[in-house]
Image: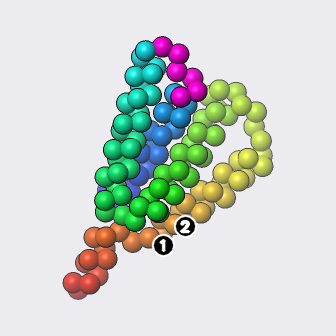
Amino acid sequence: MNKEWVKVLIAAFFEVFWVIGLKHAYDGWTWLGTALSIGISFYLLIMAGEKLPVGTVYAVFVGMGTAGTVLSEMILFGEPFNFMKVLLILLLLVGVIGLKMVTKDEKAKTEGVES
């Protein structure tokens, strides 16, 4: 995995924080943390999108963020466990991993042409 995909994963990690923050922030510090998470998340997403296909980057970002948010709500905030919901999240993650696996970054494309 190259550093651009690591940026996407870190961006998705921060997406979970800002999405939860939008629902659960209650004072200036929690809103500040939410705002910082939004900034970090989108900065990394934009940086990764400069080198990787934007559609795939966004799909992976949203898929990972969605899975992380739903699981966090269940684990941290007492949302009831739903087997079907977890199964669908796993299906979503399989699709995200598949997209990542079939997508080549611009550097790999360039290196393949020059070889």
Question: Which amino acid type is marked by label 2?
Answer: Gly
**Residue 71 position within the rendered picture, expressed as x and y whole percent measured from the top left:** 63, 39
Question: Which residue bears the numbered disc 2?
Answer: 98
- Residue ID for mark 1: 102
Q: Residue lying farthest top? A: 27
> For numbered disc 2, what is the local secondary structure?
helix
User: Residue 68, percent across and down?
Assistant: 57, 42
Type of amino acid under label 1 = Val
Q: Which percent across, then down, holds residue 70?
A: 63, 40
Residue 25 magenta: yes
Q: Which type of secondary structure does the marked residue at label 1 adopt? A: helix
The answer to whether the residue labelled 1 contacts the one labelled 2, judged by CB atoms less than 8 Å apart, is yes
User: On screen, 114 above or below 15?
Assistant: below
Decide: is 33 above or below 5: above
The quadrant in which the N terminus is found is bottom left
Task: Indicate the colouring scheme.
Answer: rainbow
Tell me which residue sits at (60%, 35%) in the image: 72
Q: Looking at the picture, does residue 31 appear above or below residue 27?
A: below
* Residue 6 magenta-highlighted: no
In the picture provided, is 66 more to the left or to the right than 52?
A: right
User: What's drawn in magenta, residue-wise?
Assistant: 22-27
